[in-house]
Image (cartoon, rainbow, N blue to C red):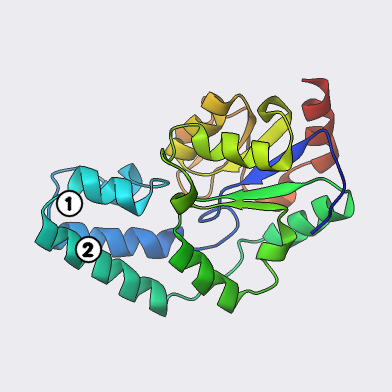
Amino acid sequence: MNNKISDIAFLFDLDGVILDSERRYSKIWYDIEQDYPTGITDFPRVIKGTTLHDILDRYFPAPEVRDEVVRRCIEAEKQMKFDYMPGAAELLDTLNAKGIPCALVTSSDKAKMDSLNRQIPELLPKFNAIVDGDMVLHGKPDPEPYLTGARLLSVSPRHCAVIEDALTGIAAGNAAGAYVIGMSDTLGRKAITRLADEVYDLLSEIPVDHIIRILRDR
């Protein structure tokens, strides 16, 4: 992690951007929704990017169901193996080498982050700031998570690039006034092209110097 002062920053979502985990979470929530039907079409996609607290309040308010959903999520995460998305480590290393501060902005809670840190201990030190779901009152699509990330880095949100794959995250980045880069792996280009400033299929395709120039010109 670099400690240089910068006028721009990169803010990253975690699941589906840094971690190759979205398909696993989709299966977890698909199975839960089969046992506790919500009536929501494509439920795993609808809730993508939102905090567990928000999901429980909105879709599983009954105490007995809520407790079981939490238990199943905790057990599933204990067994989950976390892997990098292709190009994630390399992109972070490139930004660190250039002295560009980075923040991780995720809806995950501290328990998930502790598990991640045990599995991939070199990942979190690549970030200058970390915003998890327990640190904000309003999760994505509210801009609070990305505004918090920008504030922790002392960079104006307008001069931040948000890297997201979820509709809620893209909406949060836009609402924060950031320059939003959409990753197509999770939802496909058609779903996000009109919502993001730029769209890429792989992190390795992001032209870092081009994005830096855009951020500094905004």
- Establish if 51 lies above or below 137: below
Q: Nearer the viewer, residue 56 or 41?
A: 56
Give the secondary structure at mark 1.
Answer: loop
Determine the residue positioned at 17% across, 51% down: 60
Q: Is residue 218 left or right of residue 163?
A: right
Determine the residue positioned at 52% across, 54% down: 16
Residue 192, horizontal then vertical, whole percent: 50, 33
The crowding category of the residue bearing disc 2, from other C-alpha atoms within 10 Å (few below 14, some 14 to 19, many at least 20), is many
Q: Amino acid at mark 1?
A: Phe
Determine the residue positioned at 14% across, 48% down: 38
The crowding category of the residue bearing disc 1, from other C-alpha atoms within 10 Å (few below 14, some 14 to 19, many at least 20), is many
Residue with the most extreme top position: 218
Q: Which mark is residue 141?
A: none
Q: Is residue 183 left or right of residue 72?
A: right
Q: Are marks 2 and 1 in contact (CB under 8 Å)?
A: yes
Q: Number of numbered discs present?
A: 2
Residue 161, horizontal then vertical, whole percent: 68, 36
Give the secondary structure at mark 2.
Answer: helix
Q: Is residue 151 left or right of residue 215?
A: left
- Asked which quadrant contains residue 111, the reply is bottom left
Residue 32, horizontal then vertical, whole percent: 21, 62
Q: Amino acid at mark 2?
A: Val
Spatial separation of the CA atoms under disc 2 and disc 1: 8 Å
User: Mark 1 sits on what residue?
Assistant: 60
Q: On the rendered image, what quadrant is the N terminus found in?
A: bottom right
- Asked which quadrant contains residue 182, the reply is top right
Q: On the rendered image, what quadrant is the C terminus found in?
A: top right
Q: Is residue 167 visible?
A: yes
Determine the residue positioned at 46% across, 66% down: 112
Q: Is residue 82 visible?
A: no
User: Mark 2 sits on what residue?
Assistant: 69
